[in-house]
Image (tube, grey):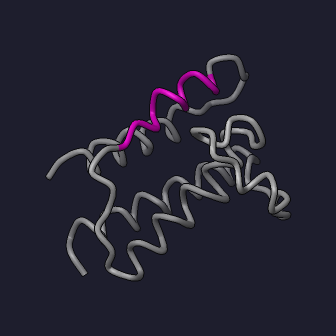
Amino acid sequence: MSLKHIAVAEILMDIEKELRDLQLWESESPSVEALASTQPFAIDTLTFPQWLQFIFIPRLYMMVEQHMPLPSVSGVKPMAEEYFQALNLNSAALILHLERMDNLLSTQ
């Protein structure tokens, strides 16, 4: 496993921890239909935290576990900033972890 894959896994654990700390981690999965959205960030069927939990995190974990090539571009931080600016949550640490992921994936 490459160092980049290990770093991705570590950041995914940090993202999950922050979602749990913010009480945004859900115990039940959305419907199959909601998860099948073709819109960016599944914006039409999921909240941003749901997209992180049920699509982003599992997809990247699968890529790490199967030693697959990782995405070469990531732009999750701007979406997080947009989503969380209207909420009264201390999301700074979560946004920082998403920025770390964006930076890691966007460097070759």
Does residue 79 appear to the left or right of 27 in the view shown?
left
Does residue 26 appear to the left or right of 39 in the view shown?
right
Location of the N terminus (image quadrant): bottom left
Residue at 36% from the left image edge and 62% from the top image edge: 8
Magenta-colored stretch includes residue 81: yes
Magenta-colored stretch includes residue 75: yes
From this view, report whether residue 18 is shown above or below residue 9: above
Residue 67 is situated, as x and y percent measured from the top left of the image, at: 32, 79
Does residue 68 appear to the left or right of 49 in the view shown?
left
Residue 85 placement: quadrant: top right
Residue segment shown in magenta: 74-84
Residue at 60% from the left image edge and 50% from the top image edge: 52
Residue 9 placement: quadrant: bottom left
Q: How many marks?
A: 0
Does residue 73 appear to the left or right of 107 in the view shown?
right
By secondary structure, the bulk of the magenta-drawn segment is best described as helix
Residue at 82% from the left image edge and 57% from the top image edge: 30
- State the residue in front, 21 or 26: 26
| Residue at the top extreme, as displayed | 86
From this view, report whether residue 15 is shown above or below residue 58: above
- State the residue in front, 81 or 37: 37
Residue 103 is situated, as x and y percent measured from the top left of the image, at: 27, 42
- State the residue in front, 106 or 10: 106
